[in-house]
Amino acid sequence: MIALKLVRLIEQHSEELAQSLIQKIENSAKSSELKKIPRREIESRAYEIYTHMSEWLLNKTEWDIERTYLELGKHRCRQGIAFNHVFWGILLTKENLWDFLQRELVEETAMELRGEIELLRILDQFFDRALYYLSVGYWQAHQEIMHEHAVTHA
């Protein structure tokens, strides 16, 4: 399976990918609020996603993605990070991966191209779901905070 070979390539370069992602986050004004998050936490999250890419794409269910990204959205909301900066961080994670694949891939046959397209479709689906559940979790935490604030000031 060619797509699996490409996912393994991502995993083998997970440290490099995590470091380049951190640089993109640090250099982007659209994610500047992510600097409020301890660097160790950002590094750990970046490394985890790239290191376990095959698990995320092949073994995890939508429920796993939902649970993980609902919690991440809630966590970021409670950290006081603006949603648009959190959202941009996920987009940078995806863009960083595309940049890497573009540098690494050389299309030699139609079969390899088909595998690459399939991988991109699966990756897109994963990131789309991650963003959706991240936004749901963020909104839920926002609603909880607003409710707590209303109760304490009533």
Image (tube, rainbow, N blue to C red):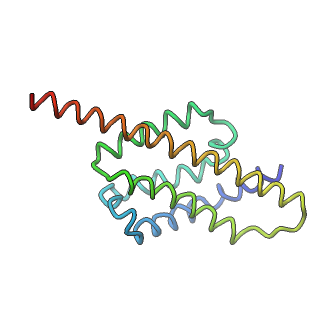
Give the answer, above or below, for where 27 lies relative to 123. below
Query: Viewed as shown, does residue 34 lie left or right of 53?
Result: left
Q: Is residue 143 above or below residue 2?
A: above
Report the quarter where the C terminus lies. top left
Count of labels shown? 0
Residue drawn at x 51%, y 46% is: 131
Q: Residue at x 83, y 68 (%)?
A: 107
Q: Residue furthest left?
A: 154
Q: Is residue 143 above or below residue 82?
A: above
58 with respect to 87 (left or right): right
Q: What's the residue at 77%, 56% (across, down)?
A: 117
Q: Position of residue 75 (x, y in %)?
A: 35, 42
Q: Position of residue 51 (x, y in %)?
A: 59, 51
Query: Residue 41 at what x, y percent from top left?
Result: 39, 52
Residue 101 picture location, percent across and down:
68, 65
Identified at 43% across, 37% down, the residue is 136
